[in-house]
Image (cartoon, rainbow, N blue to C red):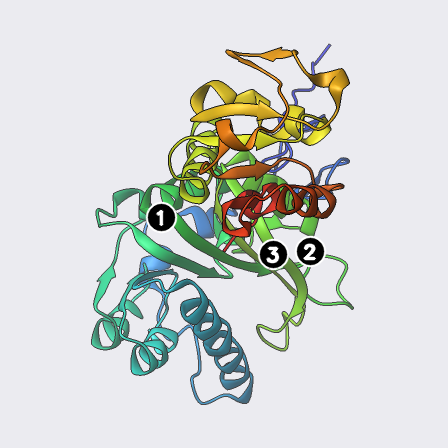
Amino acid sequence: MSVMSSSPCPCCRHEEVLQPGPAYTCCSCCGHRWRLPPEAVSSAGYYEALIARNDPQAPWFKRKIGDRIALLSALLEEGGARRVLEIGCAEGELGRAIKARFTVVYDGVELSRDSELAEQALDRVFKTPTSQVDALPYGLIVSFHVLEHIAKPERELACWSRLLSENGQLLIEVPNQSGHPLLASDHNPEHLHQFTPASLVLLLSHCGFSCEQLSVGHYESPLYQDSIRAIAKPLLTIGKREERLLARFREKLVGPFIVYGIGGDFHNYLEPWLDKLNAHALLDSSPAKWGRKYGKHAVAVYDNKLHQGFPILICSLRFGAEIKQQLITLGVEPYRLVELQTVYTDG
């Protein structure tokens, strides 16, 4: 009696009954399809022998390049990255256009012979897999229609993560399932994966990325008119999140400060870090709360003589405006008042 082995989906890790083979295995959880590479594609030197993968004069090529130039321009203007790595840069036309518009270091990874043209356009071209790339971190890594070619996408993303700066952005585009609304499946022998929006997000999450934006319907060519586009950032560890949150408190509240409003928002969004912050006193207008201890502090009422001069964190979203007006009436200068939402809001 033969035992059927299982293989986890590379994106959501759900166990499927059949091991992948030449035909696609479909995940019943996230809809991802994957298969083993055909013999011709998996042979040594397959991609290294290819040349002229694009036709820069074709209308479809100009359409997709124009769209990508606009996208990268917006990301560079918004994020200010000064080092860009394009994985699968082909002949380097996208990088050439970006370098003409921005003062950036634009490097590429390209295995095919198109790398020879890319070397004339980009700052540096790596002709090896990303696992062998040794370079300083990049603020922006982009990859258009590459990940579906990779047998082990989770390993590839680990390589990209190593090359991405802590605050960097990752831009990925892949065909949306077959890539064409009239095709039930993608028969391109080089394509080993058919992503769904769900499977791509799950893969990014499992590989330590947080998906910031996700969209579909992006044009790559007449045969791949529907692509998924994701913009992601490295997922912060619990320790790193806490470090950044505490830094925000210290930026908004320099030196010792007073906490006013000992309610739900205090318990949820400040008390867990109270012993790591320079809180001088805990105050509330309700007599029922006076005397309750949190850490080394007992809740008290505001006293202008005792609390004069300290910044005051208003620790309530719901009653913030009311508390602010109450404190101003008691003689507290408005410049001393800091609202909790300013700590938790970007910018």
**Cα–Cα span, label 2 and label 3:** 18 Å
Q: Quadrant of residue 114?
A: bottom left
The residue that disc 2 covers is: 177
Residue under the point 51% across and 57% down = 172
Q: Is residue 36 visible?
A: no
Q: Nearer the viewer, mark 1 or mark 2?
A: 1
Q: Position of residue 258 (x, y in %)?
A: 52, 31
Q: Residues within 10 Å of mark 1 (few under 14, many from 20)?
A: many
- Tell me which residue sits at (68%, 51%) in the image: 197
Q: Position of residue 105 (x, y in %)?
A: 25, 66
- Residue 47 in sight here: yes
Residue 180: name its quadrant.
bottom right
**On the picture, is 65 further left or further right than 112?**
right
**Left or right position of 141 against 292:** left
Q: How many marks?
A: 3
Could you tell me if the residues under marks 3 and 1 are in contact, i.e. CB atoms within 8 Å?
A: no
| Up-down relation of residue 97 to residue 313 (above or below) | below
Tell us which disc is closer to us: 2 or 3. 3
Q: Earlier in the sequence, mark 2 or mark 3?
A: 2
Could you say where residue 135 lies in the image, as x and y percent from the top left? 22, 50
* Amino acid type at image mark 1: Leu
At label 3, counting other C-alpha atoms closer than 10 Å, the crowd grade (few under 14, some 14-19, many 20 or more) is few
Task: Tell me which amino acid carries mark 3.
Answer: Gln
The answer to the question of whether label 1 and label 2 lie on touching residues, with beta carbons closer than 8 A, is no
Q: Which mark is residue 213?
A: 3
Residue carrying label 1: 164
Q: Earlier in the sequence, mark 3 or mark 1?
A: 1
**As displayed, is residue 95 above or below residue 318?**
below
